[in-house]
Image (cartoon, rainbow, N blue to C red):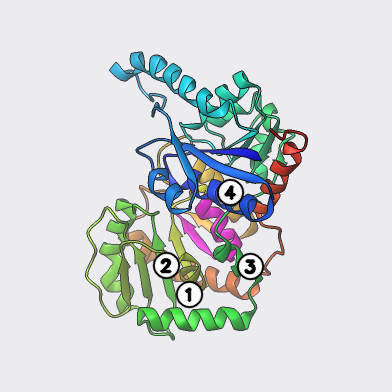
Amino acid sequence: MHRVLLVGGGTAGHVEPALAVGHWLLANGGNISCEFVGTKSGVEKDLVPSAGLKLHTILKCPMPRKVNASTFIWPLRFLVAIFQAAQIVKSADLVLGFGGYVSAPCYIAAKICGVPLIVHEANVLPGWANKLGARFATERLVAFEGTKRTGDLWTNSRMVGMPIREDIFAISKMSKSDRSVLWNATYRELGLDRTRKTIFVFGGSLGAQSINRAIESALPQMLERGFNIIHGIGQRNNLAKRAPGYVPLSYISNMASMYVASDLVISRGGAVTCAELDAANCYALVVPLPIGNGEQVANASELIAKGSAEICGSVDFTGDWLLANIDRLMADAQIWNTNCTPELRTPAAEIIGKAVLEKLVGRVK
């Protein structure tokens, strides 16, 4: 039995791609077990068990971003996390890491225990954990070509794309008639006027307050101008009042349907979101989260280069800005939606899964 450890946590952007690869391996890899390493507080505590995988947890120890009391405690916590990770990793045949603070102790543990390591970088700009792991990984995989230009460690990495949910990846393979059937069903389910142009707005599973405020401010005039708005407000935010043409949702479980039903998407620029927009051939206005190392701007750059997106800074994105630019955005979206040609691709989960199988040859316990 080959034992593969999937490592990543904290956010769905690290967990969902790992689970997509895990599902592919379990379905196609033969004599393989997949287990997950995360923390007790990240989204993995819910997502991993519900996906049917065993979850191992280690101490949460994100690197402090500024000097404070936790800065002096962090090295000790990090050493404890490495020790915990080593107990889990030592009997594995391979570690497959997807970044996030939980990954760094596991990467070091894999090096200490002599276990092969594959690192997948989801963002154009690698985070510190994957920068560390890339130094002793047996293979480096990337979701964006731009990552190869971020430093020597990534120059020879393999471009594999981003593992995303199968129903969203399948949009790129849909015929026009199949899309039309799904489009009609979604409009009926949401009670929307099918003659109106539709804007799908979301800020991730937890929502984005600045985007929500801008939509709230512009909403009356947007509805008067004849737009439908599907608004993913987020689970942490109060659900707004529904109105004709306006559908507020706390959580969106059927993202594929929403992508197909929309003429324009307004969203953050997370790696998974950008990969989904690309797979679904959506035209998007990306409003990057103004924190981190600028990775959300970089993630959106390839969509912009192919003509399927533009960026508005989070500070600039207001209700007034949206009202002043929505007609232009919708016109650009119409051009894209009319002329875009879906690309036939192999799912990233399959490519990564096969890379794992290649490394496992000869490592049966």
- For the residues marked 3 and 4, what is the alpha-carbon distance in whole angstroms? 22 Å
* Image mark for residue 172: 3
The residue that label 1 is drawn on is 261
Question: Judging from the image, what secondary structure is the residue with disc 3 in?
Answer: helix
**Which percent across, then down, holds residue 165?**
55, 59
Which mark is first along the chain, 1 or 3? 3
Which mark is first along the chain, 4 or 1? 4
Q: Nearer the viewer, mark 3 or mark 2?
A: 3
The residue that label 4 is drawn on is 22
The residue that label 2 is drawn on is 200
User: Looking at the rendering, which quadrant does residue 246 occupy?
Assistant: bottom left
Q: Residue, x 35% and y 66% (percent of image)?
A: 231
**Which percent across, then down, holds residue 138?**
70, 30
Q: Report whether 235 appears left or right of 32.
A: left
Q: Nearer the viewer, mark 1 or mark 4?
A: 4
Which mark is first along the chain, 2 or 3? 3
